[in-house]
Image (tube, helix red, strand yellow):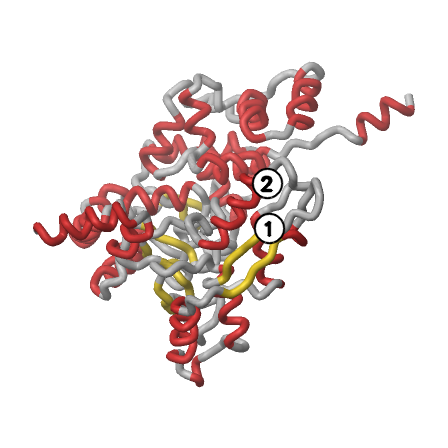
Amino acid sequence: MKDNRQNKNNAVKFDMDTFEKKYCKRYGVDPLYIASLRGIDTNNTEAYLTFLIECVGTEEEKRARKAELKQKPSVPLMTIAPIPDTGMTKQILDRFSCFPSMLHQRYADRMVEEWRENPDKFFTWVLQTMQTQKGNKIDAIDKTQPIGPENCRLSNKAKEQVEEDPFIQSVIEMAVPFKFNVQNKYKTLVSLRELDPEKWNYRDFCAWVQKQIEKGEMGPYLNRLDITKPYTPTNCYFSFRPRNGRSHGMSKTRLYSKWGYVTRNYKDMIDQPITLREFIDDAMSKNFHPNSRMRVRKNGPKITLQNVEFWSAEDYDDINRILGVFRAIPKEKNGFESIISFMDWTVRSGYCEFMDFKKVGRGKYSEKTCVWDIFTEEAYVASKGRRTYDIYQKKAANE
């Protein structure tokens, strides 16, 4: 009896929302869409949850899930009795530009408890209302009350009207030469919940893109200044280097290359795995600079970070450049503590000679408002290697 109670208390609890977020973060697509492509009944909460756990769950979670399925029957997530088998996912995707689970999550914070706890009732109302009302947005009739069966409607701002907006179409065309798909990018960010459409709607997003093009600050990649916060007009910028928060952003930089050299060439001698973050922190504690060189001293059969040494070379071009950038910042607007902190932040930003310094956020110049990044096509090509850059220059000369 005691063992049974203990197993019951230690049972793994599964949160579908958590697994969906993990799936989106790892694969960059809506899991509901992939599940439907694989023939999984997405209206069945047990089948869908099992799919999520098999894709992104730990081994312990997978084993616990298999044991749990043997003890309880599956329960449908959405039983849409009035409208059976009408392709609910496609209907909602066509109208609201998102999958059902995303639609429910979008309005969950403002729903009555009945809808929040019973998604089937929410989707029943949505599908029935779609037959009589136009629009792709759910609005509360009384803004002071939560959204519910008696207090919401579909807005009259139809999806077709937005897509046919001449201004939006002109911005989409303006962004084509930069290889940036305005519509697809916006929909992707919304589906990943990295952009709140209620706070930054599609038309305002297009207006912001137009301003970046007019200012000459357009590029193929839209990056966030602070990857822990959603995309907003003050928390994103364009560049020629992808950096979306799903990677460290240090690839092809000097410090990253040195870390790769150590972990590859001394993998049989490394006592414990050395992460990139540990390597960077150790290098900065040893006064690493962009012109620093590295050596690994072998004093025994095993090596640690204590065996890695850095010393300054005679080439000070990068240091002089970084110092020049710091001195050019107006004193009254400089939010960096010192030149040392500026140098430290520059190295941790993945600095390389092809990058430029730019203030992209509001406020004083600081780590929260500035970036080192690649802002021109020429610099991007140069960062790929000398041969690639030579080909690029010859092509530009012939044109």
Asked whether the beta carbons under mark 2 and mark 1 sit within 8 Å of each other, the answer is: yes
The mark nearer the N terminus, 2 or 1, is: 2
Q: Is mark 2 on a helix, strand or loop?
A: loop
Place of residue 276 in the rendered image (x, y in percent of width and height, measured from the top left): 56, 48
Q: What element carries label 1?
A: strand
Q: Is residue 44 left or right of residue 315?
A: right
Could you say which is closer to the camera, residue 78 or residue 60?
60
Which residue does the numbered mark 2 point to in the structure image?
266
Q: Residues within 10 Å of mark 1 (few under 14, many from 20)?
A: some
Place of residue 328 in the rendered image (x, y in percent of width and height, measured from the top left): 37, 79
Residue type highlighted by circle 1:
Val
Residue sitting at the far right: 2
Could you say which is closer to the camera, residue 330 or residue 236?
330
Q: In this view, does 129 lie to the left or right of 291?
A: left
Place of residue 159 in the rendered image (x, y in percent of width and height, measured from the top left): 27, 42
Q: Residues within 10 Å of mark 2 (few under 14, many from 20)?
A: some
Identify the residue at horizontal 22%, vertical 44% (top origin).
163
Could you say which is closer to the camera, residue 316 or residue 88?
316
Residue type highlighted by circle 2:
Tyr
Query: Mark 2 to mark 1: distance in Å?
Result: 9 Å
Q: In this view, does 133 lie to the left or right of 59?
A: left
Which residue does the numbered mark 1 point to in the structure image?
296
